[in-house]
Image (tube, helix red, strand yellow):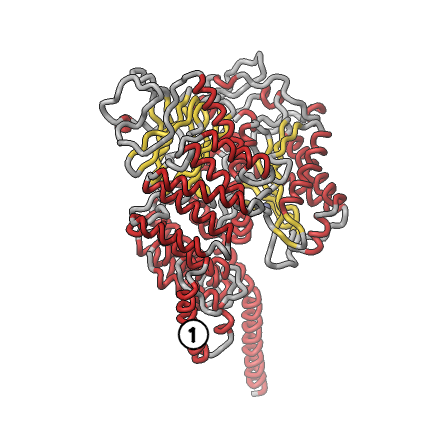
Amino acid sequence: MNSSKDDKVSKMKQSEHRLLSVLMLLACVLAWVSPLMAATAAEQLRAADERYVDLLRDKKLRNDRANWLELVESYEKVRSKGPSAAAKADFKIGKVYEQLAGFSGREADNREAIKAYRRLAAENPRNSLADDALERAASIHESRLNEKQSAIRLYRQIIAEYPEGDQVKEARKALKELGAAEREPKAEKSETKESAKSKAKETKDKDAKDKSAVKDKGPSLEEAERQYLELLKNPALRKERANWLKLIATYDALKAEHPDQAIFKIGKLYEQLGGFSNQESDYREAVKNYRLLAETQPKSSLADDSLLRAGRIQELQLNDSEAARSCYQRIINNYPKGDMLPAARERLSLIKKAQLAEVKAEAKPAAAKPEVLKTEDRPAAVVKPETKPVEARAVRLEGANAKSDEASDLSPGQSARVKSVRAWNNGDYVRVTIELDSKVPFRTFVLPPNADAAKPFRLVIDLDKSSLASAGRAPGDAAGMVSKIRFSPQQGAKSRIVLDLKEEPSYTAFRLENPHRIVLDVRTLSQAARTPTIAAERPPVIAPAPAEAAVPVKPATKPSAANGKGFGRVKSGQPSRMPTDVPSIARQLSLKVSRIVIDPGHGGKDPGAISNGLREKDLTLAIAETLATRLRKEGYEVLLTRDRDETLALEERTAFANRKKADLFISLHLNANRDTKARGIESYFLNLTTDETAIEVAARENSTSTRSLGELQGIINDLMLNSKINESSRFATELHKGLLGSSRAVNYKGADRGVRQAPFYVLLGAQMPSVLLELGFITNEKDAELLQDPGYQKTLVEGIWRGVNAYINNTGYAFYGGSDS
Ligand SMILES: [Zn+2]
């Protein structure tokens, strides 16, 4: 009895015990599992991000729609892991669909993107991505689906709900461009719907009142600008001369209040009208107004622009190169610090050249003017007219398949203007930049030589719906592999630019924004074949570097293999038997880093980040100069992309490094952040990324929006296959280590923000290991104080040169890349 009772008790106790242990186990498991679940969300996001980058990088993957949808699915799975994960996943889903739509052109894909972005904003309105998501959704409505009302609604939502957010500026701009008023953001911020409604009504009434008031007073400058854009956009309006004259009268009435802007615009209107009317009197009016502005408002920031425009019209439309000359000369004399100086110098030297040539009675090809479409090509001396368009025989040679498939910015009937064509040339490499006033699709191809017509290899760039009439003269005779850059007669709505080449080319083409540019990097095919591939970038470490290898010495002889047979350059006397992708030991030992190009970020018109009374452009220049001195002391040859406060385009900086055959390229910058507490050092190399922070930095440094950057990643990617990603990543790592080492040694407290990757235009196309350094945050008070201190600048410089030395020494061989490729 007792025993059975005891049994029962003990059984009960046992089961109690078992229950307890089960519960404890469960608790343990739960405690173990929940962080695991959280980790899984981050893990899954990262895995999906990696797939995303792979997809962007691999054309084959990209071309298969299933891969995109699978990627969406993997982000969908992350959505259930909590609100923060859901927001991140939704943003990526939106982006994936947005990019897919860019490739597929399907409306449904655009709709899916919008859906994901809006879901994010609806379900996680307090997430920091919410306003970005709304902005992207709005921009799809606006630019891809042509649904202006929907776009306007979303832009307004951003202003009303995220007045402190970073998308407000973009939203305001967009609304302005759409001709829509923004509602008072404050009125709607923290009020009930009803009062918001009544406020909205008030605003509406006020708007109506404002409008009638405007009618009495004549339009404001803003209204005039709007009409101006409308006129340019709308072919029906443009056709009527009366509309131009009416708008000119409108600006005329604004002269008293805004003298320089109004007069400049009148000049521009006449200039543009001249482009349509082809009437000399319109061009004369334009010149008159531009000169009036320069005369009466010499201090205006538009004065030098006016002189340049007046000069160009006189030179190119009115055939008065003497008058043009005086305009250009005035820019050089009176505005030596202005941004028109280089253009003025260039035009002046072209005029001089042309006049010399005239003296020699040489036949010159006419500047491009719309002419009848006939054949692709009309050299200065036409031998035989071609019977059939050369294009039929066009062949595509090596180089990027540079047919751009993005849509243009233009509405039907409108055409873009090529504003300039510039070239940087160094013999076996040339970079050509074509600047346009809007984005148009373009196509490039190579034509083989034609002995009959005495034509060489030609690289042809066709621009859709565009005109060369405002481009000035073609660069003409060039040195090195490009013998001539010229404009082909206008082919209907298409423009054609032709590069005459001495050799078969290899080339890549890419697009930049703000302003719209198409950039071509052209090399000789034999030269390109000698460029080591990425796989070859990390050759095995060979014998320990000889002591002398640490002291960089200029190569005794510059390679003479420029026209070689496609093999790696070797020390003279060595047989040139090495395959292209394995650098010879001789080569590894004989070539040392000698030339470093330092690029002080920003400059001139572009101040970079401004904060705490400092401008990025000033600090980067100061640090660059100190760095140059330091590196020169070490025996390096150092070149700066700029040594004063001047405006330089991003592509110009890389072109400079390529042209100078630099071995290393370092672009110096300072970071900025809305969060003024953010401080620390970041080092970047060029690559695709899905890291939002890195994208933000890249967008700022590229002076483009995060949106267009996202769209461009796929295109940029194709161009990076030849870039030295691995070497650059190693170079960035060494510089970063050096920077942290030296700054920590002086007790720097900012964060180590790591070595990161992002698509920086300034690094794009660089033919040597290249990095972009963000040396500190100008927006942080403590960083700002340090950054302007010459002592701390020296500390940073010390870190960079240590990094450079470490990069070279750790390689175990002298660097072979840059000047060879
Ligand atoms: Zn910068």
Q: Nearer the viewer, residue 108 or 422?
A: 422
Quadrant containing the N terminus in the rendered view = bottom right
Q: Which residue is mark 1?
A: 200
SS at mark 1?
helix
Q: Amino acid at mark 1?
A: Ala
Most extreme residue toward the top, as rendered? 573
Residue located 34% across and 35% down the image: 495
Q: Nearer the viewer, residue 279 or 636?
A: 279
Q: Position of residue 333 (x, y in %)?
A: 59, 35
Q: Position of residue 245 (x, y in %)?
A: 36, 50
Q: Position of residue 813 (x, y in %)?
A: 63, 26
The image quarter containing residue 715 is: top left
Residue located 60% across and 42% down the image: 603
The number of discs equals: 1
The image quarter containing residue 178 is: bottom left
Residue located 56% across and 69% down the image: 25
